[in-house]
Image: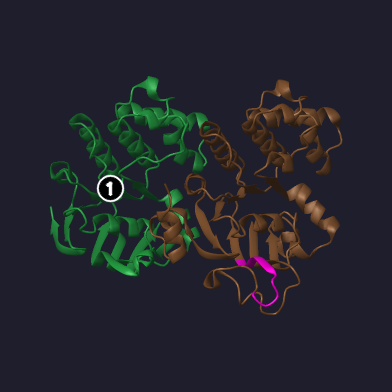
Amino acid sequence: MLTVNNLAKIYGSSCSHCLELTGPAHKSNVCPRCGSVVACANISFQVDKGEIFGLVGESGSGKSTLVRCLYFDEEATGGEARLAPYQDGRVNMLAVSAQQKRFIRNHLMGMVYQYPHLGLKMYFSCGGNIAEKLLDAGFRHVGRMRERAAELLQRTEVPPGRMDDLPATFSGGMQQRVQIAKALANSPPLLLLDEVTTGLDVSVQARVLDLIRSLQQEMQLAVVVVSHDLGVIRLLSGRTAVMKNGQMVEVGLTDQILEDPQQPYTQLLVSSQL
Amino acid sequence: MAKILNVVNLSKIFTIHILGGKVITGCREVGFSLGAGEFLGITGPSGSGKTSVLKCVYRTYLPSGGEINYISAARGAVDLAKATDQEVLYLRSGEIGYVSQFLRVIPRVAALDVVAEGLLRRGRELAEARALAGEYLARLGIPGDLWDAYPATFSGGEQQRVNIARALITRPRLLLLDEPTASLDSRAKMTVVEMLWELKAAGTAMIGIFHDLETMRKLVDHTIAMNGGRCLSLTGR
């Protein structure tokens, strides 16, 4: 479904030494020559239809930058990403026009951010927020949009009676569920989740995880889950990549990463778990 | 009988980098083969490498050497020691099951849905999957009023029965069992033995680790005894 090859994101002027002088071997993602920050480098992976792929790593390891590049929130510095339903996966979507990127984003991807205010307009009704995504995806009929919004809110367990309320008045867990409803509005084949349960209390966290998993199974979505919480990754993803200093240090089956980590950093990460 | 699993010279060595590269042996040069409907028991003291063998076959551990040749119904011969992660996931979802010592599931999912999950993944209808899950739970003696409760709140024995139901319901071709009856009372143990017998008769090949040799004797065709990571002997029943 999604194939990423050699994706890189560098903040700063960047020089020809940036990639070779940063990464886990150098314990830094700041280039000592030019001071640029290499947020992601040499990132390659694949996610199949119906598969959940996990990305773990400490703060600053580049996980969020990676999904933001895939969702075009940030412009990748280099590399390729192909999405099977876009031009049969023959075209590198990182290099297409802004208009095409908008099309991909509106029709083929959904994104849920850690902070609901990044994904939702807080002073726009909940239904309005979902309608925004539906409009982008080409819906025009108001009645049909309300119907779809109600359907999505019901699916994500937000009382449909609150469709016309403002997300600003909702609890964190409920805002997150509205965000998920919005992300799924266009029935995207690829869903990106950036630390979606971080900051939710545990009872709500379990509900949101269960919701994500059942929706994923039902819709056969390909999902990329970013989390620094190994517990979340263990429950959701089949395969997992571990990131450090902007690079992937290890990729494997999630249970293998957790029980038989190969790389020193992964061993440290896993053995630090509470 | 047609062999479906052939393990040759399997070794698992752990290198613990955070302890200065300390090397720990899981198992060394283990070999055995298994036909459809055959049950292999592994015995040995704690730390002798039994679970390492099982986890290598399931690929929770990455083998350090050797081959794990599995004849898949869908994919033909696959060396599980070298198969890609996606291939392993595919086989796990359709052919290879694992009963762990402890149940670990998403919190706040009802017992019935925990058991039905594997069927849903195989594309069965929700109502049908739930009905069958209920049958398995009932048979294992989990009372109906617990079906919509969360397994995290269950007793050890009840959790283990949910764990067993969850793995058996998919009727895998190869089933790996890590002390499946450890925390069960004798009646539940009998039921589990019965259910394993039925699967075995239908052609499921199994590898099981038991401390309870009594229960094991009722099921196994062959036994390997392990000590210090090595396979000491291979015996028929």
Frontmost residue, B206 versus A60: A60
Judged left or right of residue B41, residue A180 is right
Q: Is residue B11 visible?
A: no
Quarter of the image where one finds residue B102: top left
**Residue at the extreme bottom of the image, as rendered:** A16
Q: Residue B170's x, y, as percent? A: 40, 42
Quarter of the image where one finds residue A211: top right
Q: Residue at left 81%, top 38%?
A: A132
Q: Residue at left 56%, top 42%?
A: A217
**Vertical relation: A59 (above or below) A163:** below
Q: Residue at left 29%, top 64%?
A: B6
Q: Residue B217's x, y, as percent? A: 14, 45
Q: Is residue A34 magenta?
A: yes
Say which colour chain A has. brown
Secondary structure beneath dot 1 equals strand
**Vertical relation: A149 (above or below) B92:** above
Q: Residue A90's x, y, as percent? A: 72, 65
Frontmost residue, A51 versus A200: A200
Frontmost residue, B15 versus A237: B15
Chain assigned green: B
Specify start and end residues of the magenta stretch as a single range: A32-43
Report how many numbered discs are placed on residues in the image. 1
Query: Mark 1: which amino acid?
Result: Asp
Query: The N terminus of chain B lies in which quarter of the figure?
Result: bottom left
Q: Which residue is mark 1?
A: B178
Q: Is residue A11 magenta?
A: no
Frontmost residue, A88 versus B63: B63
